[in-house]
Amino acid sequence: MSVIALISGRGRLPHLLADRLQAEGRAVVLAEMEGFESLSAAHDDVLRFRLERLVPFLDKLQDMGVTQAVFAGGVHRPRLDPALIDPATMQLLPRIMAAMNSGDDGTLREVIALMGEWGVEVVGAQDICADLVAEPVVLSDAHPKGGDKQDAARGFEILRLMGAADVGQGCVVARGQCLALEALPGTDAMLAQLAALRAGGMALPVGGVFCKAPKPAQDRRIDLPALGPETLDAVHAAGLRGIAFEAGGVLLIDRAEMVARANALGLFLWAREGV
């Protein structure tokens, strides 16, 4: 049986994938980058690594018979400590730095390429848990109305342009106006700021749609955007009517809980055709 490495960042997704892989009897190596601990809180057999010692980590995976890897959870590009770089990883440093300087998409493509050079195929979280993504459907009791559909269409067009510039995977549109764009601080910060503006009395259009989709050219085996129940709370606090996300392109963490939360809050949860 082939061995798969689950390379973890923060959040619930790594735990969901670890549980699924272990329930299926897969041979799994759990790994996480130092500074982005998640799995080690629940497991005592997690392989820790640093980017400065990437080659020894890849060699270790190879020695353990790993032929596949799945990335899950939140990380950001870490600061490198030159004093910790081993000689073998030093040889890769120009490639690593060039990739990091080219943006998120370039960094992820280089990660996938390096894994392949060590004989490790990168697969997507959705390949492990197909139910993490949704086919085109409205999942909630509430459905988007005509104005919501127009706002979603506008939002997806904005996301297409943002994605081409390698910026963000989310935005908010209300009555055709873009109220917020997701940048480095992420979805939670964007929605919290919008809620604060409404609470502060800023005259913003009523309602609105939070739109979420992967970047058009990104490799979908890694870094797909994700939504969870807490996102619905933030959308409600921001005074929006619901979420429109790309069907097949956004990971749903705790789908049943998300649907229940959407119904309780009167929000729509719409898996929409792509950008």
Image: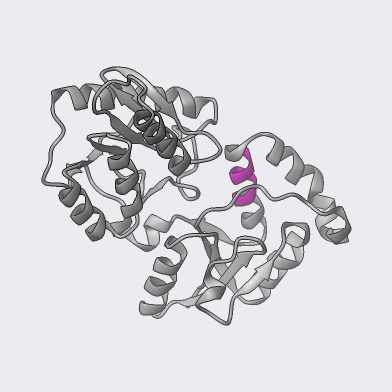
Q: Residue at x 58, y 81 (%)?
A: 45
Q: Nearer the viewer, residue 110 or 84?
A: 84
Q: Is residue 159 above or below residue 177?
A: below
**Residue found 44% across the figure and 55% down from its top:** 124
Return the residue nearer the eye: 184 or 83: 184
Q: Is residue 228 visible?
A: no
**The C terminus lies in which quarter of the figure?**
top left
> Image point 24% across, 28% down: which residue?
207
Left or right of 50 in this view: 206: left
Q: Position of residue 215 (x, y in %)?
A: 46, 34
Residues in magenta, as a range: 106-112
Q: Position of residue 103 (x, y in %)?
A: 63, 35
- Magenta span: predominant SS is helix
Residue in front for this viewpoint, 22 or 169: 169
Return the residue nearer the eye: 198 or 120. Answer: 198
The image quadrant of residue 242 is top left
The image shows residue 90 at horizontal and vertical percentages of 85, 53
